[in-house]
Every structure is written in C-alpha cells, then in structure tokens.
Amino acid sequence: MKVFRKSGIILAATLMLLMSAACGSGSTAGNPGGDAGGNAQQPVASNTGSESAADKDQSSDQKITLGFSQVGAESGWRTANTKSIQDSAKEAGIELKFSDAQQKQENQIKAIRNFIQQKVDVIAFSPVVESGWDTVLKEAKDAGIPVILTDRAVDSKDTSLYETFIGSDFVEEGRRAGKWLVEQYKDNEEEITIVELQGTTGSAPAIDRQKGFAEEIAFDPKLKIIASQTGDFTRAKGKEVMQAFLKAHKKIDVLYAHNDDMGLGAIQAIEAAGLKPGEDIIIITVDGVKDGFVAASEGKINFIVECNPLLGPQLMDAVRDVVNGRDVAKRIVTVEGVFTSEDAKRELPNRQY
Ligand code: AHR
C-alpha cells in the first residue's frame, strides 16, 4: 500500500496540474469512479471496459494483491462464483490469494488474519454467516487494509469496517418466490402445504430468503409452511431432509428450496418416493445454475428465482477503485431475473454456468 500512497500523492499533483490546464474548458472531466448517478442497481465502477480510467491509475503498472476468502464449494452457484472471481482477477492483472473456508467461519477468520499478515492491498470475502466479524474486521481496519464484502452481508453495526457490499438482494429473491406462489394459487380454495429447505443456518441468504418469502405468502392465509429445515445449500442434505419431510407429511403441495442444489437433491427423494416433481409437488428454487435450468426445462422445477454468481468483474472494478482512492457506493446490488419452466427451456442454451 505504501507504493500506492506515494503514487497517490504524485497522481494528485499531476491531476491538479492537468485540471488547472483544463480550466476554462467548462468540462467537469467525468468522474470515472462515480456511483453511476447514485443508482445502486448499477455496477459502481464506471471504469468497466474503459481503458482510459485504468490508464489514469498511477498504480496500473503495479500489481494489486487481493486476498479472497471463499465460503466453500457447497453448490453449483459457488463453483461458478469462484471461477468468475479467479478469471476476472487474471483478466484485470490482479494477483489473487484465494482461500476456501469449507463452510466454516473459523477458517475464514484465519484466512483474513493471514491476509493481514501478508499485507495484501485489499481483502474480500463472502461471509459464511452474518454475525461475529467485528473483531477481525477491526484488525484489518487497524492494519489499513480495506475490506470488500461479496455475495453475503455481515450484521456489523459499524459499516466503516468495510468499503462496500457487492451482491444480490436476498430478501427480494424470497419475495419473488412468494409472489409467484401467491399468484399460482389465487383461485384455489383449499389449504396449500409448503415445505421449505433452508440454506446454511445463520447465513444471510437463508435468513433473507425465508423472510422475503414469508412476507409475501402471509397475504394468502391458505398458504401454510408445515416444515422448514436447513439443507446447508448442498444436494446431499437437500435429498436427506426431503426424504424426512416425505416420511413425516402425507400431503406436501409445494417445496421452496433456498437454492437449486437442495432442490435437485429433493427431486431425487421425490422421484424415489414414486411422485412426480413439478406436478405432484410444485417446486420453487433460487439460483439458476445450469443443472437447475435443465430440471426446469424438463418441468421438474416450476419456478427459479435467479441469483447471479458472476460477481468477479464488479469485484475487480471495486478493488481498483478502492486502491486508487475513488468513491465506491456502499451497496452494489446485482441485477437478476426469474424463470418459469418455459423460460428455462428457451434460455438453457445460453446459460453460461
Ligand atoms: O450466497 C449465495 C448462496 O450460496 C447461493 O444461493 C447458494 O447456492 C450458495 O451456496
């Protein structure tokens, strides 16, 4: 970072000279690090694909080192997310120190402390759970290393502990799932029983997807969640928990799974029980990975709420902006869609992950 700070002084002096030379032209000289008009839906780093912004970075010829602590490899979504981060770092010429926490918070804390010791320029991580980060985030702050959150949020009250949070609006994802279900059953009279496969306990997507879904189905009292349990975002656990649901409940009308992988595991359990997924049990999942799309195009999943894992390019832009002292919006929301089985059939050939 020392190099960058020195460079920053030279850059500031150069900019002042350039600005005074440009004075009188009436130009506001476009802010490459602006927050795209304050629109949180936009990637904040407006230097995407712009050579001139990178050219202006004093540090562009000095290698930035990014320490990244990943949650694990629990799902297809996570695999796509890891690849996106690794590919984008390579493309951006950023040196990536990558660490896989295997779904354990203590491993992530250890990795972050290692990054601090190695004096990386920026630390980014996708927190496995929401709570318990304040101490290690303070350690990074005291060491002068900026932190970027990707994919999942933390519940720290002190938001100065991180620069920005790049990722989906999980509550909105839950709402989208709930809204679709309410619409499907709007003309029905009898009670509709729902089982829920939750993500990792204490994780932001599990908490928020449950909340958003519950909010929406509350508008229709005949929609009832009769069982809700974690499947830890994995296929194996999704299958196991669905088997238990099927044993315990005679009538299950709907399955809401917090990700595709758990939904795909549950489909195996449903088929093994002699039932037809997508017909005997309506299935809603979140993510939209290729395997989920295949199941949806076969009619086994009825509705997928998209959660985009391709966060790498936005992360690298934010890393550059932070290192170069440009403003970064505190929250960068990923833009996402929803897909019915019909949409999935059409979209499948274009799916990248
Ligand atoms: O945090 C994003 C979630 O984590 C994805 O929806 C899930 O598949 C992953 O494991």
Image (cartoon, rainbow, N blue to C red):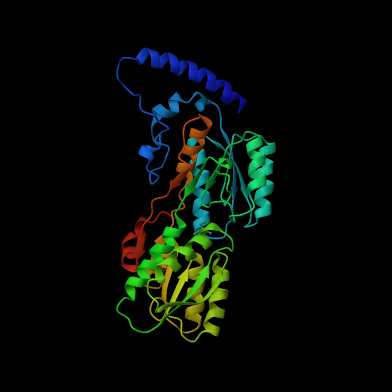
Picture layout, residue 264 above or below residue 47 = below
- Which residue lies most toward the bottom here? 250
Hey, which quadrant is residue 34 in on the image? top left
Q: Which residue is drawn at 45% across and 53% down?
A: 168
Picture layout, residue 134 above or below residue 37 = below
Position of the C terminus by quadrant? bottom left
Picture layout, residue 188 above or below residue 209 = below
Count of marks overlaid on the render: 0
Residue 298 appears anywhere in the view: no
Q: Residue 117's spot in the image, x, y percent?
A: 70, 37
Picture layout, residue 283 above or below residue 332 = below
Who is closer to the viewer here, 311 or 256? Answer: 256
Who is closer to the viewer here, 101 or 91? Answer: 101
Who is closer to the viewer here, 234 or 109? Answer: 109
Who is closer to the viewer here, 253 or 101? Answer: 253
Q: Residue at x 51, y 59 (%)?
A: 205
Residue 20 appears anywhere in the view: yes
Q: Residue 100's spot in the image, x, y percent?
A: 62, 51
Q: Residue 349's spot in the image, x, y percent?
A: 35, 58
Position of the N terminus by quadrant? top right
**In-image side of 42 versus 82 (left or right):** left
Hey, which quadrant is residue 145 in on the image? top right
Q: Which residue is drawn at 57% across and 52% down?
A: 155
Hey, which quadrant is residue 95 in on the image? top right
